[in-house]
Amino acid sequence: MKKNYFANCMVRYGGYFLTGLIFSFCLASIVVKGNKIISQAVDTLLAGGEVEFWKFIITFLVLTILGFVLAFLKSILLSVFSLKVQKRYKNLLADKLYHLEYRYFDENGSASIINKMNSDIAEADNLLRESIPDICTNLIEMCVYAFYVGQLNGKLLILMLLSYPVVLYFTRYVADKLTSLKKTFRQKSDSITEIAQDCMSGILVLRSFGAEDYFQKKLDRATEELVENEAKRTRMSNTVIIIRRLLSWIPNIICAIYAYVLVKNGNLSIGELMAFIIILERFVNAFTGVPFGMVDAKEQYVCVRRVEDILNSREEFSGTEKTMPESDVAVSFQNVMFSYEDHKAVLENLSFSIEKGKKVAFVGESGGGKSTIFRLICGFYPVNGGEYKLFGRNFSEWDLEAARACMALVSQNVFLFPTSIYENVRYGNRNAKKEDIIEACKKARIHDFIVSLPEEYDTIVGERGILLSGGERQRISIARAFLKNASLLLLDEPTSAVDVGTEQFIQEAIDQLVENRTCIVIAHRLSTVCNMDEIMVLKDGIIVEKGSHEELLKKQGVYAGMYGKEQKGGMEE
């Protein structure tokens, strides 16, 4: 069963809201009280009596001041309620994003997630700040004013309420239409954001292949669809405004005519008529404000539901064990099965053990399951079957943060944050001192390059590290791994995307990095794994061969064939 986080946040701070509504009730009661005073004064004067002027003025002045105070306090309380709910709701969303299953990011585009975090949250703010308080305030005012009118004349109240079913029917119809259009609008906005994001991320490819016109037309189509949808929504909204005004005039006209008849027949005094006319406008505004406010709220709640989809998504499962157990085995897979959502099995009954301090490589053709093994080791996905142990403990028992603290990943696709080199290296250990960071960069063979820059360690690397070369980014990533000082190193072909000269620097850094550590390597260049303690050859999620480089060459099997092709290709070059 899905949990409603938005409602829970409202309940958490409901005291502010309820107190604000009590002030709304008091404020409406003051308006009624003021109307009664005016009504009685007019009837007294028309009957030839006298009204104590200063008593009338002082009473009215006191009610006015009290009304201003109550209105101010009501506004403050409802604002505090809105701000506190917004803050908690945003914090819940931010916290949730860090704990979502990795699978969620595979299945949902980043553009949709960004829109939910920005514009959808903004709509939730509007719902809290305007729609919900307005609906509740109007409902209270309508009840207070209706009770007052009922005291004046019960038939007059019945006549006022007769048009309400018509208002409700119309607003329900409009709300369904606008809600549907709002859903489409959010989906179209996601598409436009996604196209724009693709254009910016792939600008080099886009321009080098002359695909600007294709993306421009794609963006134009998406924008046109969005505009058409918004045109429908605007027409519907304008119609709502016109109908609301019409519906507000109907009870005004009917009630005014009937009130005239009541006065003529002596069933309503002139003073009561004046009070009724004054209160009628307020009543009708509240009367139509409730259902039409619900139209706005239902439209805005579309965005809340989109945020709720994130908040109700599954989180990564985490155990509680944080201490490193005593074990001679670093990583162990026993009959592990795994497949991605609605896809065929990637790993089938995969079994292997890697002893502490050993250096092991996984090789094989693309799609064989090498990267999937790394994702399972890091706990990005749970295994579908079998057993995975990290340092002798079942991974499901590990506290995720503690487990990942034991690992350092150096990927071929290095991600750098758009901040300084210093901060990017420091992500390896947020408590590290500057001298530790410099020492890590020296070991990664990147220090000399950094100090040659005008800003040295304060140099901004740009989005995704675009201002640095591939080799420079890779060595910063290795410096991060040095700084983390983890027991288990995961190297995803860190030299595959660099030139020969840079590869030597990186290989020297890696050789130093892997000393006295367990190291698992994904390799595409077989020449980089010749010195591994063990090489495992994967094919279709199964280990078909394993052994040292020399042992596998002697077998003249899959590995020997792959190595021969690589050597032949190198010689031809």
Image (cartoon, rainbow, N blue to C red):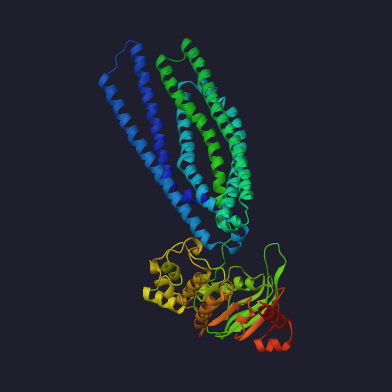
Q: Position of residue 119 (x, y in %)?
A: 51, 47
Q: Assign the N terminus to one quadrant of the image.
A: bottom right
User: Which of the two residues, 179 or 531, is positioned nearer the viewer here?
Assistant: 531
Q: Assign the C terminus to one quadrant of the image.
A: bottom right
Tell me which residue sits at (70%, 62%) in the image: 342
Above or below: residue 466 compared with residue 406: above
Q: Position of residue 293 (x, y in %)?
A: 52, 35
Above or below: residue 432 compared with residue 134: below
Q: Position of residue 370 (x, y in %)?
A: 64, 74
Q: Residue furthest front?
A: 573
Q: Is residue 7 visible?
A: no
User: Residue 541 falls in which quadrant of the image?
Assistant: bottom right
Q: Is residue 242 visible?
A: yes
Q: Residue furthest left?
A: 54
Tell me which residue sits at (35%, 37%) in the image: 72
User: Which of the two residues, 548 or 98, is positioned nearer the viewer here?
Assistant: 548
